[in-house]
Image (tube, rainbow, N blue to C red):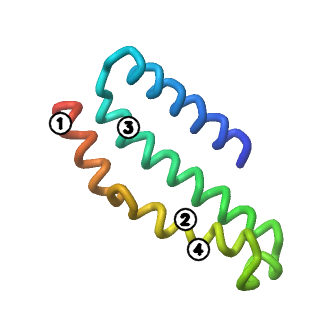
Amino acid sequence: DMQADLLATQAFLEAVAAKMKAGEQPIADICMLKNHAVACMEHCAGDAVQILGGAGYIQGAKAERIYRETKVIAIGGGASEIMKDLAARQLGW
């Protein structure tokens, strides 16, 4: 599941990058991509901690640090609700 999420996120990123390279400004797509990428990151980080069991929760462990940082990254650039609202406005909703 983690690999599938990562591949889907990469494909979405490449599609948005292609639009930007073509001169488009796909604001709604960028907002949706940010939310999708954050959800993917949270899912993968959470699963990594679970896979490692108790060792995944030890402060200083790489998985624990990444899991903790996902919360900060999710807020940076705009919280998911803000991104959803912006995407909806760009799509005319």
Task: Name which residue type carries label 2.
Answer: Thr
What residue would you read off at disc 3? 30
Residue at horizontal 34%, vertical 60%?
A: 79
Left or right side of 26 for 62: right
Q: Earlier in the sequence, mark 3 or mark 4?
A: 3
CB under 8 Å between callouts 3 and 4? no
Other-residue count near label 2 (Cα within 10 Å), few / some / many at <14 / 14–19 / ≥20: some
Q: Tell me the amino acid under the disc marked 3.
A: Ile
Amino acid tagged 1? Trp
Q: Give the alpha-carbon distance from disc 1 to disc 3, as whole Å.
A: 16 Å
**As drawn, 69 above or below 1:** below
Label 1 with label 3: CB-CB less than 8 Å: no
Tag 3 secondary structure: helix
Looking at marks 1 and 2 on the same chain, the residue that comes earlier in the sequence is marked by 2
Q: Rounded to the nearest whole Å, what is the CA distance between mark 1 and mark 2?
A: 29 Å
Q: Earlier in the sequence, mark 1 or mark 4?
A: 4
Mark 1 vs mark 3: in front: 3
Position in image of residue 37 (x %, y %)? 52, 47
State the image coordinates of residue 33 (x, y, percent, origin top left): 44, 40
What numbered label is drawn on residue 93? 1
Q: Which residue is mark 2?
A: 70
- Mark 4 lies on residue: 68
Q: State left or right for residue 7 relative to residue 92.
A: right
> 5 or 18, which lies in front?
18
Decide if residue 72 is on the left or right side of residue 67. left
Gap in angstroms between the C-alphas marked 2 and 3: 19 Å
How far apart are the alpha carbons under marks 1 and 4?
34 Å
Q: Quadrant of the C terminus?
A: top left
Query: Rounded to the nearest whole Å, what is the CA distance between mark 3 and mark 4?
Result: 24 Å
